[in-house]
Image (cartoon, helix red, strand yellow):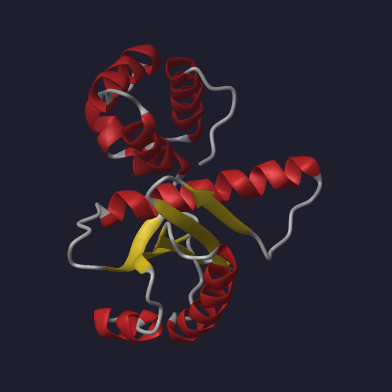
Amino acid sequence: MSQTTLERAVEDVGPLRAVFITAMPDCLLYDAWERAEDGFEVEEIAAYFGDLVRSNRQGLKALGSWSSDMQVTIESAESLVVIREINEHFVCGCVFERSAPLGMVRLQMKRMIERIAEMLPQVEAQERPRGVRLVEFVSRYAPDPHAALMRISVRTGLTMEQLEAAEGLDADAVERLESATKRILGLTQLSV
């Protein structure tokens, strides 16, 4: 989707500050639009929005109330953030001015999602190797990613070069990598 196409999809939404289209399941930036003065780190934000939707989906499934028509709304002092699944391959995250009325934002989101959905390609997502997703998870969430990867290397017996080329890890190495990642990050489950 070209930048001008996304601009056309959001052109009549006054209080909108930014839109991030995230490709799932790998939480990669597909496209973004933002006001010139905001200067967001678009790739990082898109990844977090994708992770947020994935975590929300798992939480709702655990409650037995999952629905494909799901939306996450975050209200902060400066922004109103709405994240919605377009389909199983794409997530749309929008940042609005905090002064925008929530009812109006919901209506504008519905209209934008319809326009954006028509512009997106029909794709079949190919899941990347679990080892790659685990290393990316550590790089994204560890307080000191390099130190965390070095600790994982020591605990698993995998070299840093093997971790950098994680797509070539066998099932045993991926299992050791996942176990070490959980221990080092203090987590019982990973959303990858």
Give above or below for 11 relative to 85.
below
Q: Is residue 88 visible to the viewer in this orientation of the structure? A: no
Residue closer to the observer: 83 or 117: 83
- Quarter that holds the N terminus: bottom left
Q: Position of residue 63 (x, y in %)?
A: 78, 42
Number of numbered markers: 0
Q: Residue 117: x percent and y percent?
A: 50, 80
37 is higher (above) or lower (below) than 55:
below
Residue 139 position in % (x across, y down): 31, 34
Viewer-nearest residue: 38 or 56:
38
Q: Residue at x 48, y 79 (%)?
A: 112
Residue beneath the point at 44% across and 26% down: 177
Left or right position of 118 against 72: left
Residue at image position (52%, 69%) is: 105
Question: Where is residue 62 drawn, in percent x and y?
Answer: 75, 40
Q: Quadrant of residue 107?
A: bottom right
The answer to whether residue 153 is visible is yes
Asked whether 162 or 102 is in front, the reply is 102
Specify the quadrant of the image occupied by residue 142: top left
Q: Nearer the viewer, residue 160 or 29?
A: 29
Say which residue appears at 43% left-offset and 63% top-offset: 94
Q: Quadrant of residue 43?
A: bottom left
